[in-house]
Image (tube, rainbow, N blue to C red):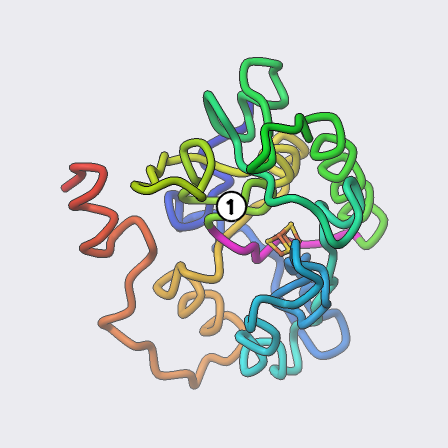
Amino acid sequence: MYSAAMRMPHDPSAIDRLRPPSPEEPWRVLLSGCIAGLPCGVDGTDYGFGGAMAAFFALPGVVAVPFCPEDAGLGTPRGWPDIHGGDGEDVLAGRARVLDPDGADLTAGMIVGAEAMVRHAHAHAIDFAVLMDMSGACATQVISDGSRFVEERRYRRGVGVAAAALLRAGFPVVSQRDDRTLERLRVRLDPDHVVDAAAEDHHERAWYREYFGTT
Ligand code: SF4
């Protein structure tokens, strides 16, 4: 079981526990490959997300370490893997499965990819991970509750398979949608940065609060 405290939007003190970054010893940040612009999406594209965090990673105290767990475990292109019956932690515990839209079981490949991502994180001594939310592998806030290719797509609070494996291994995570946390990280990198006081993390936004009935 992973520690919820390692999800930085839910425990901002995890940001304070990060070592001081510097140009000489920059934070090494594991980054979902598609956000880094790798053509590793299910369709061989970056889903249009490449460069989405270019300004953050242009700062001198941080370097990106891109990786795609689904490509590592299933190859590209592939069927779209969504979790049925739980989240990524449940998949690792054998309580849920990952299926493609045709019902093919992709669970084993997703676990292989998650384990490869953890090895990559250790090999590069990463400080934390910035991951693509809503992915069956990389999500850190929300996943599809079953296939996304249904008339009325359903969502579940939870993490993807690779994110769960990273959390189990003790690596802090944040999603690319967690703007408030990313702003706080940016201040650690650039003390002169003027924080956007209106920035919200994914779980603070109106859609999330209305859909999941949180306050
Ligand atoms: S598994 Fe992660 S890195 Fe790979 S395409 Fe999906 S969201 Fe991007």
Question: Which percent across, then down, holds residue 140?
Answer: 48, 44
- Front residue of this view, candidates 91 and 21: 91
Relative to 81, say whether 203 is above or below: below
Residue at 65% across, 76% down:
61
- Does residue 22 show up magenta in the picture? no
Residue at 72% across, 60% down:
40
Give the residue pinned by disc 1. Answer: 139
Splitting the image into 4 quarters, where does residue 18 fall? Answer: bottom right
Q: Which residues are magenta?
A: 125-133
Asked whether, in this view, residue 203 is left or right of residue 150, the answer is left
Q: Mark 1 vs ligand 1: CB under 8 Å?
A: yes
Asked whether, in this view, residue 44 is left or right of residue 204, the answer is right
Question: Which percent across, then down, holds residue 54?
Answer: 58, 80
- Front residue of this view, candidates 177 and 82: 82
Quadrant where the N terminus lies? top right
Question: Which percent across, then down, holds residue 111?
Answer: 72, 30
Relative to 103, say whether 187 is above or below: below
Asked whether, in this view, residue 93 is left or right of residue 83, the answer is right
Where disc 1 sits, the SS reads loop
* Amino acid at the residue labelled 1: Ala
Asked whether, in this view, residue 62 is left or right of residue 90, the answer is right
Question: Which percent across, then down, holds residue 173?
Answer: 54, 48
